[in-house]
Amino acid sequence: MRRDSIFYKLFKQFPGLLFELVDEPPPEAESYQFESVEVKETAFRIDGVFLPPDNAVSKVVFFAEVQFQKDEDLYYRFFSELTLFLHRHSIRYDDWFGVIIFGSRNLEPSNLRIHRSLLAGDQVRRVYLDELGELQQQPLGLGLMLLTIKEGTEAIETARFLLEQAQVQSEAAIIDLITTIIFYKFTNLSREEIDAMLGLPLEEPRVLREAREEARQAGREEGREAGWEAGREAGERSIVLRLLNRRLGAVPDEFLSQIQVLSLAQLEDLGEALLDFSTVADLEAWFQQK
């Protein structure tokens, strides 16, 4: 389950969602801009930075970290990243607030002593998704967060409930995110099997749908010249390259040459994995693993 990319999509489309987890949101909460920021000097990456609008009375920057696996170094990294960010932008912001989202409490680092003053202060909120309460009582956005920690039958029931609510409210973006989460959770099932479980027709996630639409013509032309199977491989390669350019910007030549020799199965694998990529280093790590 690729939860990092899910939460990136959530916060990118609905930056105001973070402030539903904050006791005292700023007056301009709905105008904040979400970014995933890389502090290049140390190769740190902050999961989410919520930047105040230019007209905000108080320039408070919000930091978000999403954690679904045990990491004893989490707080060392999180506080180092945000401190370095504030150092680089000391003139722009007056204050900061951090929100750390755990799938459950047992994923929190064991030793809290060294960071106790920061964690006990009024600038940090720790959220445990499995302790938020009944899903039916949550706004749709928080319901999506809860869907990421559900498994098996419970995930299907949760998805059905959220789909019904999203349809009632005509929330197309929410429906698309529910679709993406279910595809990630049940990769071993076919489209038809997932449709049957949910009782609703599911569409392919929008990010893949758009890339396939853009690459369709190129793949068709190459298919005419090289035959159906080769054309399918060429089309998949075109999709992967377009998605990589969207996620990472210009892909270095050294990786372009490696992509050109990947098999169809490898291209399909890369096409799924790249949805979690944030930097070229992620692409390099994928090639090293393969």
Image (cartoon, rainbow, N blue to C red):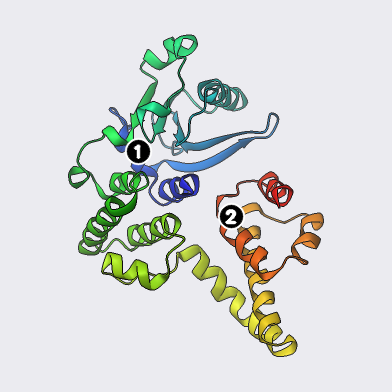
**Sequence-first disc among 2 and 1:** 1
Res. 27 visible in picture: no
Does 36 sit above or below residue 203? above
The label on residue 29 is: 1
Does 194 sit above or below residue 277? below
Identify the residue at horizontal 55%, vertical 20% (top origin): 76
Identify the residue at horizontal 42%, vertical 58% (top origin): 186
**x and y percentages locating residue 90 in the rendered image:** 57, 23
Q: Nearer the viewer, residue 52 or 70?
A: 70
User: In which quarter of the view is residue 163 placed?
Assistant: bottom left
Q: Nearer the viewer, residue 47 or 30?
A: 47
Look at the numbered discs 2 and 1 and tell me whether their residues touch, using CB distance below 8 Å: no
**x and y percentages locating residue 78 in the rendered image:** 53, 26
The label on residue 273 is: 2
| Amino acid identity at mark 2 | Ala
Q: Is residue 61 left or right of residue 222?
A: left
